[in-house]
Amino acid sequence: MKAIQFLGANKIGLNNVPTPETPKGWAKIKVSYAGICGTDLNIYAGTHPRAKAPLIMGHEFSGILENNTSVMKKGERVTVYPLISCGGCTPCKSGNAHVCNTLGLYGIDADGGFAEYAFVPEENLVRIPEELPMKTGALIEPIAVAVHTLRETGFMPGDNTIVFGAGTIGLCTALTLRLFGAGRVTVAESDEARLELAKELGFETINPVKYDIAQFTARKTNKDGFDRVYDCAGAQSAAGALLDVVKARGQIVIVASYKKPVEMPFFKGMAKEASINFVRVYRKKDVEIAAQIAAREPLYSNIITHVLPPQKAQEGFVLLSTKGTGAVKVMYKFD
């Protein structure tokens, strides 16, 4: 089968690799679409601490089930819950397998979906609604991150919110907030192309490099600040502004995966008695909910800016690694 493999730092290639046998209790999936995640960029750069070459990357994908399983039948449209949990540690035993002490993911710790076929345990399958295009089906995983973020942190309809970052996770979070009934959803982003996409999706926006975000917040919230602040940017510029825009006793949620230590003016947080919460990936229920809401909101598909054939594997990573390309979600089409 053809597979896009990580071969070393800044080196990937489309290779012919043997098609594995399907183990008992596992699913064989004919991959339709697979998306590049921020984690895949770290793997590509050679900076991910666990990913080892040669590796078939990709944990965001959709496809057709190739074999009958105990949970679904051959021919069904599926995506996957890509987490690998041990099942025996305290988090796993307490119903929190998504923060397993040794958590792994297909596409990082084992071969994933950047191939003609992908293989996962049958219990990791998630059905794609018939009305949802297969391309958008490959976006269910990042939508699940947004669903998990809201479900785990006490979001209430009517809350006024601001999202830092208009990448895939930021825009998925903004759209999900609106679907869940947020009172106001503002998107802060310094990349003008991504900011324009946020505007096209109907959000109020601000470029915090060009405008004072504290003054903007004061003007928009009658000097109160936002009820909930979602950091989907993962940069020092965002970390330094979060406590300026949150209201007294408001909530900051760190969704982004920070790669470097950052500084935050914690006295501002103490003065406001604000809370800071962290979230990680999702539960399987979040993925199932994401599949359902993706079928009801066609605007999620607008986040997908580029679809490439596997033969252009390198081009996909260059698009996302280069500023000013306007790329947000880049996918490969395998079928």
Image: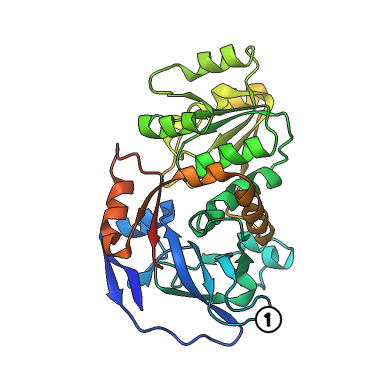
**Of residues 243 and 15, which is closer to you in this image?**
15
The residue under the point 53% across, 56% down is 133
Q: Quadrant of residue 99?
A: bottom right
The residue under the point 51% across, 60% down is 134
**Of residues 72 and 47, which is closer to you in this image?**
72
Asked whether residue 276 appears in the rendered view, the answer is no
**Residue 32 pos. (x, y %):** 45, 66
**Residue lying furthest front in this view?**
131
Asked whether residue 330 appears in the rendered view, the answer is yes
The quarter of the picture where the N terminus appears is bottom left
The residue under the point 57% across, 23% down is 245
**Of residues 73 and 225, which is closer to you in this image?**
73
Q: Secondary structure at mark 1?
A: loop
- Residue indicated by mark 1: 70
Number of numbered discs on residues = 1
Asked if 107 appears above or below 306 in the picture, the reply is below
Asked if 133 appears above or below 30 in the picture, the reply is above
**Residue 315 pos. (x, y %):** 27, 54
The residue under the point 74% across, 63% down is 94
10 Å neighbourhood of mark 1: few (<14), some, or many (≥20)? Answer: few
**Residue 301 pos. (x, y %):** 50, 47
**Of residues 42 and 61, which is closer to you in this image?**
61
User: 262 left or right of 266?
Assistant: left
Q: Amino acid at mark 1?
A: Ser
